[in-house]
Amino acid sequence: MVTDTFRTGLLDLALVPRLTPDLTLRASQWLAQLAGVDALFLPDHLVGLLPSSVWRPEDFGAARLTPNANAFHEPWTALGYVAAQNNLRRLRLGIGVTDAGRRNPAVTAQAAASLHLFTRGRAILGLGPGERENNAPYGVAWDTPVARFEEAVETIRVLWESGGEPVTRDSKFFPLRDAVFDVPRYRGTRPELWIGGHGPRMLRAVGRYADAWFPAYPQTPAQYREHLTAVRDAASNAGRDPRSIVPAAMLFVITGLSDDGIEEAVESVAARAFGLCMSSEVWARHGVQHPLGDNFSGIQDLLPHLLDRDTVLSYAEKVSPAMVRDYCVVGKPDEIRDQIAVWRDHGLRYPVLVNFSSVHPKFGPVLTSNLPIIRALRKLRQL
């Protein structure tokens, strides 16, 4: 991919809805096609970002359609289903992102390579160290997530490059002993590797390995440019072309048909509760102490499903509308375009939007938010 080309993606939250299990998957695919995006992504989660204690119809409009906060589709299975329906305009399909340690990297390599065949060369493997919520409760060690990530990437790469020959490789976490990987390439290609990361060590890994940098953690455009510079420096140090790495980002968007409706979403319990996923650094920018501590890292270490309703509501009261507008892109389509244009001016070339308008407490505005999302994505094509 040419990094100077401005493209867009859409991420579906992949929660199991009422009525039929593929309802939201089909809707997101339809929206992506109407909006003219390049790719559709699904997350890889067992536990959601929002505390389930406030996932109630009176607080959260989308709960009327997706009643269970943690009922996620298994993403590779779901993407295989979407690939079978991907005939009208062949979208690229990707994971945004999968945990390096929770899945054995040989299985991840196999899943991504298979999806690449099914999509005729349009698969994207998004990979990151993951979050505590999707690992520790399930018996996956969480003491060295970045080290596990680096070993997983190396394992995937060596298997993809093995040509079917047995591979033996020492590794603290994922040793290989005469391991065979024989899933063929699609016309000589493997899936693009998009890495989500934000710490110094992860940024260096992006520069060494990634086809795209794909952070999801909130940062200012100025911070994004600074981190992108670190990625490109790491790529140069690894002997790679730094311009070959696509600068992407996952952006949570709150929109609607009216200013009043947008403001209601911004002030909702769910939007403010999402602030718990932010680091203490984000809270400090607004002169507020994070209720989970001055050094709290945010979603990477949050266990939202263990927080009771009263606790979440008390914490959410500390979150101002200005803070919500800090960690979300908020507004009508023109305003969304203008805000993302600032990110573009700081290096971003591939925003992947998450329609977070589902935080509105009423179901009607949740449904109608799809129209401004389509309009916003179309306007982004002008950038």
Image (spheres, rainbow, N blue to C red):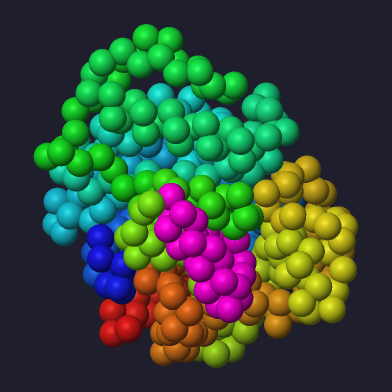
> Is residue 223 highlighted in magenta?
yes
Query: What is the x, y in percent for residue 282?
Result: 73, 70
Q: Which residues are magenta?
A: 214-238
On the picture, is 109 further left or further right than 356? left
On the picture, is 170 further left or further right than 321? left
Residue, x 31% and y 48% (percent of image)?
192
Residue 295, picture quadrant: bottom right
Residue, x 67% and y 24% (percent of image)?
139
> Which residue is at the far top?
178
Residue situated in front as seen by the camera: 59 or 201: 201
> Is the magenta region chiefly helix, strand or loop?
helix
Residue situated in front as seen by the camera: 82 or 39: 39
Please, is residue 26 above or below residue 148 in the view? below
Residue 361, picture quadrant: bottom right
Residue, x 61% and y 67% (percent of image)?
218
On the picture, is 321 further left or further right than 362? right
On the picture, is 316 further left or further right than 265? right
Residue, x 37% and y 71% (percent of image)?
349
Question: Where does the C terminus fall, quadrant-wise?
Answer: bottom left
Query: What is the x, y in percent for residue 136?
Result: 70, 32
Please, is residue 53 above or below residue 61 in the view? above
Query: What is the x, y in percent for residue 328?
Result: 58, 73
Tell how many labels: 0
Q: Is residue 250 visible?
A: no
Residue situated in front as seen by the camera: 161 or 195: 161
Query: What is the x, y in percent for residue 85?
Result: 21, 46
Q: Is residue 285 visible?
A: yes
> Is residue 58 highlighted in magenta?
no
Question: Where does the N terminus fall, quadrant-wise?
Answer: bottom left
Residue situated in front as seen by the camera: 294 or 34: 294
